[in-house]
Image: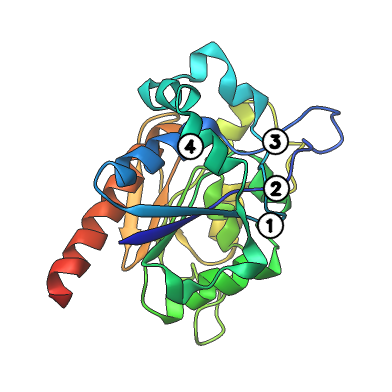
Amino acid sequence: MKVLFVLTSHDKLGDTGKKTGFWVEEFAAPYYTLADEGVKIDLASPKGGQPPIDPKSTEPDAQTPATKRFYEDEDLQHKLSRTKKLSEVRAEDYDAVFYPGGHGPLWDLAKDKDSIRLIEEFTKLQKPVAAVCHGPAVLAEAKAPGGEPLVKGKKVAGFTNSEEEAVQLTNIVPFLVEDRLKELGGNYSKADDWKPYVVTDGLLITGQNPASSEPAAEQLLKMLQQRQVSTK
């Protein structure tokens, strides 16, 4: 089994002068959940090379066993520094795609043509698409084969308006994930702020926040294992 992880290349938090990027926990926890079960993982980003890490995700209160393992994992850090360019990857080479969050994707991946192409290709090939926290923003411009928004009529989750308010970025981000998913016709639902919450609709897996990243990866792993069994 082979999964593609797509990370943001965007590091500017609007006009604040502060930095953003991807959220370490939302990358590390899903990565190890899958890799420990023998899944091969490739990493890609719009620009290739080292994707920016959101500085907030390296603060003490954001650490988990997975992030601590990541900081000690020189091999994975080296691999992360050499992500493939999104324009050079193809859906047919993978069994699924996973998008970690962090605020970066709101600026680049949400409208990145290569990312949109990939999501639509995975969908056409009937392969799972998973995204967590701000990751579901990448679905904003993706279309279903019939031309409708990909999330229309689908059960979806993602970072809530109240969680965005709690981190005081409501007026900084280009759009709110919850609002956008609803505007596109998604059947959006959520749990209490910061609680793990993942929804699956067909081959689409979406998680609400950092706490949802590992459960989302577990859902993806289960889906991949079931598909592997059914094709044997």
Q: Nearer the viewer, residue 63 or 211?
A: 63
The residue that appears at 31% across and 68% down in the rendered structure is: 202
Q: Residues within 10 Å of mark 2 (few under 14, many from 20)?
A: many
Q: Which residue is mark 3?
A: 170
Tag 2 near tag 3, CB within 8 Å: no
Whichever of labels 1 and 3 marks the residue nearer the N terminus, that label is 1
The residue that appears at 41% across and 43% down in the rendered structure is: 190
Locate the C terminus and report the quarter of the image it occupies: bottom left
Does the rendering let one see residue 122? no
Q: Which residue is mark 4?
A: 76
Whichever of labels 4 and 2 marks the residue nearer the N terminus, that label is 2
The disc labelled 3 sits on which kind of residue?
A: Thr
Q: Residues within 10 Å of mark 3 (few under 14, many from 20)?
A: some
Does the rendering let one see residue 22? yes
State the image quarter where residue 14 is shown.
top right
Q: Which residue is mark 1?
A: 46
Q: Position of residue 215 (x, y in %)?
A: 31, 41
- Please state if 18 lies on the left or on the right of 182 as rendered: right
Q: Position of residue 97 (x, y in %)?
A: 44, 60
Q: Which residue is mark 2?
A: 9
Badge 1 marks a residue whose secondary structure is loop
Locate the N terminus and report the quarter of the image it occupies: bottom left
The disc labelled 1 sits on which kind of residue?
A: Pro
Q: CA distance from mark 2 to mark 3?
A: 21 Å
The residue that appears at 40% across and 58% down in the rendered structure is: 3
Up/down of 156 relative to 165, above or below: below
The residue that appears at 61% across and 34% down in the rendered structure is: 164
Q: CA distance from mark 2 to mark 1?
A: 6 Å
